[in-house]
Amino acid sequence: MLEEIERRRELGYPPFRHLVTLVVSGPESEPALRVLRELKQRLAGAGAELLGPAPLLRLRGRHRAQLVAKTDAPRAFAVQAAQLLAAAAPAMRKAGLSAVVDVDPQSL
């Protein structure tokens, strides 16, 4: 137990930092990954360590990809990510993509 706590501290995982996940899904895998790569570039200076993007297993026939942020300011990061996603919403809708931002997710 103490080893796990120390590992979490060193790696910046909860309870020492917060996680925010951004999941994009769509009919094809590459557009979802492309959106997350662009988001990662735009969020680079947002005070978070960004992991990914990485593909996830398909769910209900939709391809999914995920970007994970480790941050001390999860709400501020989520707001910034949501603003970027809102600006991209028309193009994402046209491509059949949807996105979810989850602060302190229960599972990855």
Image (cartoon, helix red, strand yellow):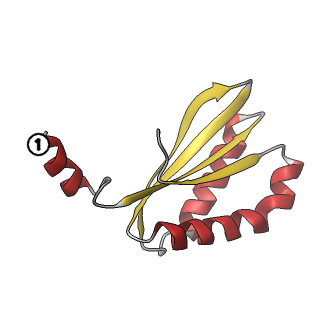
Numbered marks: total: 1
Residue 92's spot in the image, x, y percent?
A: 80, 53
Identify whether 95 is placed above or below 28.
Answer: below
Q: Residue at x 23, y 50 (%)?
A: 8
Give whichever of 15, 91 is nearer the camera. 15
Which residue is at a point 69% across and 70% down the rendered structure image? Answer: 83
What residue is shown with label 1?
3
Residue at the location (67% across, 65% down)?
Answer: 82
Three-letter code for the amino acid on which mark 1 is drawn: Glu
- Give the percent coordinates (x, y) of residue 29: 68, 36
Horizontal relation, residue 21 to residue 60: left or right = left
Residue 4 falls left or right of residue 18:
left
Which residue shows up at 47% across the image and 42% down it? 106
State the image coordinates of residue 40 (x, y, percent, origin top left).
54, 61
The quarter of the rendered structure image containing the N terminus is top left
Q: Residues within 10 Å of mark 1 (few under 14, many from 20)?
A: few
In the image, taking residue 92 as reference, residue 34 lies left or right, namely: left
Q: Quadrant of residue 28?
A: top right
Query: Residue 15 or 44: which is nearer the viewer?
Result: 15
Residue ranking furthest to the left:
2
Q: In terms of secondary structure, where does tag 1 sit?
A: helix
